[in-house]
Image (spheres, rainbow, N blue to C red):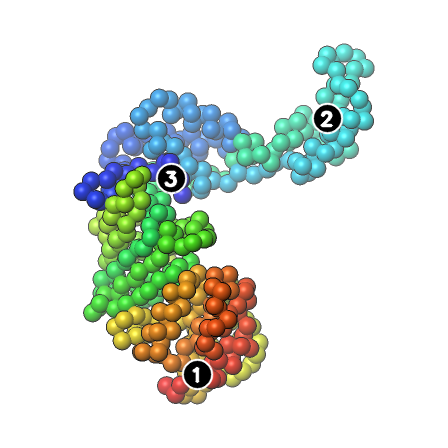
Protein backbone atom coordinates (compact mmCIF):
# COMPACT_ATOMS: atom_id res chain seq x y z
CA UNK A 1 0.00 0.00 0.00
CA UNK A 2 1.06 3.60 -0.47
CA UNK A 3 2.31 5.68 2.42
CA UNK A 4 1.00 9.21 2.89
CA UNK A 5 4.10 10.86 1.41
CA UNK A 6 3.58 9.01 -1.89
CA UNK A 7 -0.08 10.01 -2.43
CA UNK A 8 -0.75 12.13 -5.51
CA UNK A 9 -4.03 14.04 -5.32
CA UNK A 10 -5.41 17.51 -6.06
CA UNK A 11 -8.16 19.48 -4.32
CA UNK A 12 -10.63 21.70 -6.19
CA UNK A 13 -14.06 23.01 -5.16
CA UNK A 14 -13.93 21.04 -1.89
CA UNK A 15 -13.44 17.77 -3.74
CA UNK A 16 -10.32 15.63 -3.91
CA UNK A 17 -9.24 14.07 -7.16
CA UNK A 18 -6.75 11.19 -6.85
CA UNK A 19 -3.88 11.28 -9.34
CA UNK A 20 -5.03 8.23 -11.30
CA UNK A 21 -2.75 7.02 -14.09
CA UNK A 22 -3.29 5.26 -17.41
CA UNK A 23 -1.08 3.32 -19.77
CA UNK A 24 -2.48 5.48 -22.56
CA UNK A 25 -0.04 8.18 -21.45
CA UNK A 26 3.43 7.38 -22.91
CA UNK A 27 5.34 8.78 -19.92
CA UNK A 28 3.34 6.59 -17.52
CA UNK A 29 3.88 3.48 -19.64
CA UNK A 30 7.60 4.20 -19.74
CA UNK A 31 7.84 4.51 -15.95
CA UNK A 32 5.77 1.37 -15.35
CA UNK A 33 7.92 -0.66 -17.73
CA UNK A 34 11.11 0.71 -16.16
CA UNK A 35 10.04 -0.36 -12.67
CA UNK A 36 8.84 -3.80 -13.72
CA UNK A 37 11.89 -4.39 -15.90
CA UNK A 38 14.30 -3.44 -13.13
CA UNK A 39 12.71 -5.57 -10.42
CA UNK A 40 11.73 -8.54 -12.58
CA UNK A 41 15.32 -8.76 -13.82
CA UNK A 42 16.81 -8.69 -10.33
CA UNK A 43 16.12 -12.21 -9.04
CA UNK A 44 18.75 -13.18 -6.47
CA UNK A 45 19.98 -9.62 -5.88
CA UNK A 46 19.95 -7.87 -2.53
CA UNK A 47 17.18 -5.37 -1.92
CA UNK A 48 19.79 -2.66 -1.38
CA UNK A 49 21.27 -3.39 -4.82
CA UNK A 50 17.83 -3.15 -6.44
CA UNK A 51 17.19 0.14 -4.65
CA UNK A 52 20.38 1.55 -6.11
CA UNK A 53 19.34 0.51 -9.62
CA UNK A 54 15.94 2.16 -9.12
CA UNK A 55 17.60 5.38 -7.94
CA UNK A 56 19.60 5.48 -11.16
CA UNK A 57 16.40 5.09 -13.18
CA UNK A 58 14.61 7.70 -11.08
CA UNK A 59 17.16 10.40 -11.80
CA UNK A 60 15.93 13.96 -11.23
CA UNK A 61 12.54 13.51 -12.91
CA UNK A 62 9.50 15.50 -11.80
CA UNK A 63 7.41 12.34 -11.28
CA UNK A 64 9.33 11.03 -8.26
CA UNK A 65 6.19 10.30 -6.23
CA UNK A 66 4.76 8.25 -9.08
CA UNK A 67 7.98 6.32 -9.67
CA UNK A 68 8.55 5.56 -5.98
CA UNK A 69 4.91 4.59 -5.53
CA UNK A 70 5.08 2.15 -8.43
CA UNK A 71 8.29 0.68 -7.03
CA UNK A 72 6.82 0.24 -3.54
CA UNK A 73 3.69 -1.51 -4.82
CA UNK A 74 5.84 -3.84 -6.92
CA UNK A 75 8.09 -4.59 -3.95
CA UNK A 76 4.98 -5.38 -1.90
CA UNK A 77 4.18 -8.21 -4.30
CA UNK A 78 7.72 -9.62 -4.21
CA UNK A 79 9.24 -11.94 -1.63
CA UNK A 80 12.64 -11.29 -0.09
CA UNK A 81 14.38 -13.91 2.03
CA UNK A 82 17.30 -14.17 4.43
CA UNK A 83 19.94 -16.51 3.01
CA UNK A 84 22.32 -17.78 5.68
CA UNK A 85 23.53 -21.24 6.88
CA UNK A 86 22.22 -20.41 10.38
CA UNK A 87 20.19 -17.47 11.73
CA UNK A 88 22.41 -14.39 11.20
CA UNK A 89 22.12 -13.40 14.86
CA UNK A 90 23.67 -16.74 15.88
CA UNK A 91 26.27 -16.39 13.13
CA UNK A 92 27.31 -12.97 14.38
CA UNK A 93 27.68 -14.34 17.90
CA UNK A 94 29.94 -17.15 16.69
CA UNK A 95 32.07 -14.74 14.64
CA UNK A 96 32.46 -12.26 17.52
CA UNK A 97 33.38 -15.03 19.98
CA UNK A 98 35.94 -16.52 17.60
CA UNK A 99 37.39 -13.09 16.96
CA UNK A 100 37.65 -12.37 20.70
CA UNK A 101 39.33 -15.76 21.27
CA UNK A 102 41.95 -15.05 18.63
CA UNK A 103 42.77 -11.57 19.83
CA UNK A 104 43.46 -8.42 17.78
CA UNK A 105 43.05 -8.79 14.03
CA UNK A 106 45.69 -7.80 11.53
CA UNK A 107 44.78 -5.58 8.60
CA UNK A 108 47.71 -6.99 6.62
CA UNK A 109 47.27 -10.49 5.18
CA UNK A 110 50.77 -11.91 5.86
CA UNK A 111 51.60 -15.49 6.73
CA UNK A 112 50.60 -16.38 10.27
CA UNK A 113 48.66 -13.13 10.79
CA UNK A 114 45.30 -13.22 12.52
CA UNK A 115 42.88 -11.79 9.92
CA UNK A 116 39.14 -11.56 9.43
CA UNK A 117 39.43 -14.20 6.69
CA UNK A 118 40.94 -16.60 9.21
CA UNK A 119 38.04 -15.98 11.61
CA UNK A 120 35.47 -16.68 8.88
CA UNK A 121 37.38 -19.79 7.77
CA UNK A 122 37.33 -21.17 11.33
CA UNK A 123 33.61 -20.54 11.82
CA UNK A 124 32.84 -21.91 8.34
CA UNK A 125 34.68 -25.13 9.15
CA UNK A 126 32.61 -25.53 12.31
CA UNK A 127 29.38 -25.01 10.37
CA UNK A 128 30.41 -26.95 7.27
CA UNK A 129 29.76 -23.82 5.18
CA UNK A 130 31.62 -21.99 2.43
CA UNK A 131 33.96 -19.33 3.95
CA UNK A 132 33.51 -17.08 0.90
CA UNK A 133 29.74 -16.72 1.53
CA UNK A 134 29.91 -16.41 5.32
CA UNK A 135 30.79 -12.71 5.31
CA UNK A 136 27.78 -12.00 3.06
CA UNK A 137 25.51 -13.91 5.44
CA UNK A 138 26.64 -12.00 8.53
CA UNK A 139 23.92 -9.33 8.18
CA UNK A 140 21.62 -11.22 5.82
CA UNK A 141 18.61 -10.57 8.08
CA UNK A 142 18.75 -6.80 7.49
CA UNK A 143 16.16 -5.56 4.94
CA UNK A 144 18.76 -4.15 2.54
CA UNK A 145 20.68 -7.46 2.59
CA UNK A 146 17.74 -9.78 1.96
CA UNK A 147 17.61 -11.30 -1.52
CA UNK A 148 14.78 -11.32 -4.04
CA UNK A 149 13.45 -14.88 -4.32
CA UNK A 150 9.94 -14.45 -5.75
CA UNK A 151 9.00 -11.90 -8.41
CA UNK A 152 5.85 -9.77 -8.27
CA UNK A 153 4.02 -11.49 -11.10
CA UNK A 154 2.54 -8.13 -12.11
CA UNK A 155 2.23 -6.93 -15.68
CA UNK A 156 1.89 -3.27 -16.69
CA UNK A 157 -1.92 -3.23 -16.52
CA UNK A 158 -1.91 -5.03 -13.17
CA UNK A 159 0.52 -2.53 -11.64
CA UNK A 160 -1.50 0.45 -12.89
CA UNK A 161 -4.68 -1.07 -11.44
CA UNK A 162 -3.05 -1.60 -8.06
CA UNK A 163 -1.62 1.92 -8.09
CA UNK A 164 -4.98 3.60 -8.72
CA UNK A 165 -6.65 1.50 -6.05
CA UNK A 166 -3.82 2.22 -3.60
CA UNK A 167 -4.33 5.99 -4.03
CA UNK A 168 -7.91 5.64 -2.80
CA UNK A 169 -6.89 3.30 0.02
CA UNK A 170 -4.32 5.82 1.26
CA UNK A 171 -6.86 8.67 1.21
CA UNK A 172 -9.35 6.61 3.23
CA UNK A 173 -6.82 6.34 6.06
CA UNK A 174 -7.85 9.86 7.11
CA UNK A 175 -11.63 9.39 6.73
CA UNK A 176 -14.01 9.74 9.66
CA UNK A 177 -16.88 8.00 7.85
CA UNK A 178 -17.28 6.23 4.54
CA UNK A 179 -20.74 6.09 2.95
CA UNK A 180 -21.34 3.30 0.45
CA UNK A 181 -24.36 2.54 -1.71
CA UNK A 182 -24.99 -0.65 -3.67
CA UNK A 183 -27.57 -0.01 -6.39
CA UNK A 184 -30.22 -2.75 -6.47
CA UNK A 185 -27.75 -5.49 -5.49
CA UNK A 186 -28.61 -9.12 -6.04
CA UNK A 187 -28.64 -11.25 -2.84
CA UNK A 188 -25.25 -12.81 -3.73
CA UNK A 189 -23.72 -9.35 -4.30
CA UNK A 190 -25.10 -8.03 -1.00
CA UNK A 191 -23.84 -11.07 0.89
CA UNK A 192 -20.41 -10.81 -0.73
CA UNK A 193 -19.98 -7.18 0.38
CA UNK A 194 -21.38 -7.73 3.87
CA UNK A 195 -19.15 -10.80 4.35
CA UNK A 196 -16.15 -8.60 3.52
CA UNK A 197 -17.26 -5.93 6.01
CA UNK A 198 -17.67 -8.55 8.72
CA UNK A 199 -14.45 -10.33 7.82
CA UNK A 200 -12.42 -7.11 8.14
CA UNK A 201 -14.26 -6.38 11.43
CA UNK A 202 -15.30 -2.88 10.35
CA UNK A 203 -17.72 -0.80 12.41
CA UNK A 204 -20.77 -0.21 10.24
CA UNK A 205 -24.46 0.61 10.07
CA UNK A 206 -26.46 -0.89 7.19
CA UNK A 207 -29.83 0.39 5.98
CA UNK A 208 -32.14 -0.12 3.02
CA UNK A 209 -33.22 2.66 0.65
CA UNK A 210 -35.88 0.97 -1.41
CA UNK A 211 -33.89 -1.55 -3.50
CA UNK A 212 -30.48 -0.09 -2.60
CA UNK A 213 -28.26 -1.24 0.26
CA UNK A 214 -26.55 1.62 2.12
CA UNK A 215 -23.63 1.25 4.52
CA UNK A 216 -21.90 3.79 6.72
CA UNK A 217 -18.48 2.57 7.76
CA UNK A 218 -16.56 4.20 10.57
CA UNK A 219 -13.26 5.49 9.23
CA UNK A 220 -9.91 5.29 11.03
CA UNK A 221 -10.16 8.96 12.08
CA UNK A 222 -13.35 8.21 14.07
CA UNK A 223 -11.61 5.79 16.45
CA UNK A 224 -9.65 6.69 19.56
CA UNK A 225 -7.15 3.84 19.10
CA UNK A 226 -6.20 1.00 16.77
CA UNK A 227 -6.33 3.48 13.86
CA UNK A 228 -3.44 1.89 11.93
CA UNK A 229 -4.84 -1.61 12.17
CA UNK A 230 -8.36 -0.40 11.44
CA UNK A 231 -7.12 1.67 8.50
CA UNK A 232 -5.48 -1.42 7.02
CA UNK A 233 -8.74 -3.33 7.43
CA UNK A 234 -10.65 -0.60 5.59
CA UNK A 235 -8.03 -0.57 2.84
CA UNK A 236 -8.27 -4.36 2.43
CA UNK A 237 -12.06 -4.06 2.13
CA UNK A 238 -11.97 -1.64 -0.82
CA UNK A 239 -11.09 -4.22 -3.55
CA UNK A 240 -14.22 -6.20 -2.66
CA UNK A 241 -16.37 -3.08 -3.06
CA UNK A 242 -14.87 -2.46 -6.50
CA UNK A 243 -15.96 -5.97 -7.53
CA UNK A 244 -19.60 -4.91 -7.23
CA UNK A 245 -21.41 -4.09 -10.51
CA UNK A 246 -23.04 -0.81 -9.36
CA UNK A 247 -21.75 1.10 -6.36
CA UNK A 248 -20.81 4.55 -5.09
CA UNK A 249 -18.54 5.77 -2.28
CA UNK A 250 -18.43 9.12 -0.50
CA UNK A 251 -16.04 10.14 2.29
CA UNK A 252 -14.60 13.31 3.79
CA UNK A 253 -10.83 12.89 4.00
CA UNK A 254 -7.88 15.00 5.16
CA UNK A 255 -5.49 16.34 2.52
CA UNK A 256 -2.92 18.68 4.08
CA UNK A 257 -4.97 21.49 5.67
CA UNK A 258 -8.16 20.72 3.78
CA UNK A 259 -10.97 18.25 4.36
CA UNK A 260 -12.36 17.65 0.87
CA UNK A 261 -14.91 15.09 -0.22
CA UNK A 262 -13.86 11.93 -2.06
CA UNK A 263 -16.55 10.63 -4.42
CA UNK A 264 -16.20 7.48 -6.53
CA UNK A 265 -18.44 5.00 -8.31
CA UNK A 266 -18.29 2.06 -10.70
CA UNK A 267 -17.55 4.44 -13.60
CA UNK A 268 -14.36 5.80 -11.98
CA UNK A 269 -12.36 3.06 -13.69
CA UNK A 270 -10.93 1.33 -10.64
CA UNK A 271 -9.96 -2.30 -11.21
CA UNK A 272 -10.01 -4.82 -8.37
CA UNK A 273 -7.34 -7.46 -7.96
CA UNK A 274 -9.54 -9.31 -5.45
CA UNK A 275 -11.17 -12.61 -6.28
CA UNK A 276 -14.41 -14.00 -4.89
CA UNK A 277 -13.03 -16.90 -2.90
CA UNK A 278 -16.45 -17.87 -1.62
CA UNK A 279 -17.07 -18.41 2.07
CA UNK A 280 -14.45 -17.05 4.41
CA UNK A 281 -14.69 -16.16 8.07
CA UNK A 282 -12.83 -14.44 10.83
CA UNK A 283 -10.84 -16.70 13.11
CA UNK A 284 -13.29 -15.90 15.94
CA UNK A 285 -16.15 -17.25 13.80
CA UNK A 286 -14.18 -20.35 12.81
CA UNK A 287 -13.23 -21.14 16.41
CA UNK A 288 -16.79 -20.59 17.58
CA UNK A 289 -18.24 -22.94 14.94
CA UNK A 290 -15.82 -25.69 15.99
CA UNK A 291 -16.59 -25.30 19.70
CA UNK A 292 -20.34 -25.03 19.21
CA UNK A 293 -20.42 -28.21 17.12
CA UNK A 294 -18.53 -30.03 19.89
CA UNK A 295 -21.38 -29.24 22.33
CA UNK A 296 -23.73 -31.56 20.38
CA UNK A 297 -26.65 -29.40 21.48
CA UNK A 298 -29.10 -30.46 18.80
CA UNK A 299 -29.02 -27.00 17.21
CA UNK A 300 -27.95 -26.77 13.58
CA UNK A 301 -25.62 -23.93 12.67
CA UNK A 302 -26.18 -22.10 9.37
CA UNK A 303 -23.50 -19.81 8.02
CA UNK A 304 -23.97 -16.75 5.80
CA UNK A 305 -27.66 -16.01 6.58
CA UNK A 306 -29.52 -13.24 4.80
CA UNK A 307 -29.47 -9.72 6.32
CA UNK A 308 -32.42 -8.92 8.60
CA UNK A 309 -34.26 -5.60 8.21
CA UNK A 310 -34.94 -3.41 11.25
CA UNK A 311 -37.93 -1.32 10.27
CA UNK A 312 -36.07 0.75 7.69
CA UNK A 313 -33.66 2.14 10.31
CA UNK A 314 -31.01 -0.52 10.06
CA UNK A 315 -29.97 -3.96 8.93
CA UNK A 316 -28.65 -6.78 11.10
CA UNK A 317 -26.06 -8.99 9.44
CA UNK A 318 -25.87 -12.21 11.49
CA UNK A 319 -22.77 -14.37 11.32
CA UNK A 320 -24.73 -17.51 12.20
CA UNK A 321 -28.32 -18.72 12.40
CA UNK A 322 -29.32 -21.48 14.83
CA UNK A 323 -32.23 -23.84 14.16
CA UNK A 324 -33.85 -26.58 16.22
CA UNK A 325 -37.21 -27.71 14.94
CA UNK A 326 -39.23 -24.52 14.48
CA UNK A 327 -37.07 -22.49 16.86
CA UNK A 328 -34.65 -19.94 15.36
CA UNK A 329 -31.98 -17.63 16.77
CA UNK A 330 -29.12 -15.56 15.34
CA UNK A 331 -25.60 -14.56 16.40
CA UNK A 332 -23.77 -11.40 15.35
CA UNK A 333 -20.04 -11.04 16.18
CA UNK A 334 -18.77 -7.51 16.78
CA UNK A 335 -14.97 -7.34 16.53
CA UNK A 336 -14.33 -3.60 16.34
CA UNK A 337 -16.94 -1.48 18.08
CA UNK A 338 -17.47 1.72 19.99
CA UNK A 339 -19.90 2.51 22.78
CA UNK A 340 -22.33 4.06 20.32
CA UNK A 341 -22.32 0.90 18.20
CA UNK A 342 -23.67 -1.22 21.05
CA UNK A 343 -26.19 1.42 22.13
CA UNK A 344 -27.55 1.69 18.58
CA UNK A 345 -27.75 -2.09 18.20
CA UNK A 346 -29.69 -2.46 21.45
CA UNK A 347 -31.96 0.51 20.69
CA UNK A 348 -32.94 -0.88 17.29
CA UNK A 349 -33.36 -4.37 18.73
CA UNK A 350 -35.76 -2.99 21.32
CA UNK A 351 -37.78 -1.13 18.67
CA UNK A 352 -37.69 -3.52 15.73
CA UNK A 353 -36.06 -6.76 16.81
CA UNK A 354 -35.12 -9.38 16.01
CA UNK A 355 -35.63 -10.40 19.61
CA UNK A 356 -33.87 -13.68 18.91
CA UNK A 357 -30.47 -12.08 18.25
CA UNK A 358 -27.40 -12.69 20.44
CA UNK A 359 -24.44 -10.29 20.25
CA UNK A 360 -20.85 -11.49 20.80
CA UNK A 361 -18.74 -8.45 21.70
CA UNK A 362 -14.94 -8.30 21.85
CA UNK A 363 -13.56 -7.25 25.24
CA UNK A 364 -10.66 -5.52 23.47
CA UNK A 365 -12.93 -2.58 22.67
CA UNK A 366 -15.24 -2.64 25.68
CA UNK A 367 -15.78 0.55 27.65
CA UNK A 368 -15.72 0.75 31.41
CA UNK A 369 -19.48 0.07 31.42
CA UNK A 370 -19.20 -3.19 29.45
CA UNK A 371 -20.19 -5.17 32.53
CA UNK A 372 -23.57 -3.40 32.50
CA UNK A 373 -24.49 -4.69 29.04
CA UNK A 374 -27.68 -6.80 28.99
CA UNK A 375 -27.89 -10.57 29.03
CA UNK A 376 -28.37 -10.59 25.27
CA UNK A 377 -24.66 -9.73 24.96
CA UNK A 378 -21.81 -12.23 25.40
CA UNK A 379 -18.33 -10.72 25.76
CA UNK A 380 -15.18 -12.53 24.70
CA UNK A 381 -11.41 -12.02 24.60
CA UNK A 382 -10.08 -14.21 21.79
CA UNK A 383 -12.48 -17.17 21.81
CA UNK A 384 -16.28 -16.79 21.93
CA UNK A 385 -17.61 -18.94 24.81
CA UNK A 386 -19.83 -21.45 23.02
CA UNK A 387 -21.63 -22.58 26.20
CA UNK A 388 -22.67 -19.04 27.09
CA UNK A 389 -23.92 -18.44 23.56
CA UNK A 390 -25.92 -21.67 23.72
CA UNK A 391 -27.55 -20.51 26.95
CA UNK A 392 -28.53 -17.19 25.32
CA UNK A 393 -29.80 -18.99 22.20
CA UNK A 394 -32.03 -21.26 24.30
CA UNK A 395 -33.39 -18.18 26.10
CA UNK A 396 -34.14 -15.93 23.11
CA UNK A 397 -34.95 -18.38 20.27
CA UNK A 398 -38.32 -17.77 18.65
CA UNK A 399 -40.62 -20.01 16.67
CA UNK A 400 -39.98 -19.39 13.00
- Crowding around mark 3 (Cα neighbors within 10 Å: few <14, some 14 to 19, many 20+) is few
Pick the residue in front: 23 or 314: 314
Identify residue for label 2.
120
From what the image shows, is residue 397 above or below residue 50?
A: below
What residue is pinned by disc 3?
Answer: 4
x and y percentages locating residue 21 in the rendered image: 27, 38
Q: Quadrant of residue 328?
A: bottom left
State yes or no: discs 2 and 1 in contact (Cβ < 8 Å): no
Q: Secondary structure at mark 3?
A: helix
Residue drawn at x 30%, y 32% as measured from the top left: 29
Mark 2 or 1: the one toward you: 1
Mark 1–mark 3 Cα distance, whole angstroms, equals 48 Å
Dot placed on the residue nearer the N-terminal end, 1 or 3: 3
Number of numbered markers: 3
- Disc 2 from disc 1: Cα separation: 71 Å
Residue in front for this viewpoint, 388 or 169? 388
Q: Quadrant of the C terminus?
A: bottom left
Residue at 25% across, 68% down: 208
Is 248 left, or right, of 387 in this rendering?
Answer: left
Per the image, label 2 sits on a secondary structure element best described as helix
Report the quarter where the N terminus lies: top left
* Image x and y of residue 81, in percent: 56, 39
C-alpha span from label 3 to label 2 = 44 Å
* Disc nearer the start of the sequence (3/2): 3
Mark 1, residue position: 396
Q: Residue at x 46, y 73 (%)?
A: 373
Amino acid sequence: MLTGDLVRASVKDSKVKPGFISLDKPSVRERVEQVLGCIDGAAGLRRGEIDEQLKELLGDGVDQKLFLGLAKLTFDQCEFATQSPIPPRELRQKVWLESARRGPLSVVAVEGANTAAAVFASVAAELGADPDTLADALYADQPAEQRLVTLSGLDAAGLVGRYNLALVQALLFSAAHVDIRLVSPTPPDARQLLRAVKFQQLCFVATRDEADLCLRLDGPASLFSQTTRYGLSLAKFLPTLVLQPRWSLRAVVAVKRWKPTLELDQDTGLVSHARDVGRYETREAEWFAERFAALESGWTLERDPMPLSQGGEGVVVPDFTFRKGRRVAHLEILGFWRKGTIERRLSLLKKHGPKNLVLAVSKRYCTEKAAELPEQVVSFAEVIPAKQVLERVEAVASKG
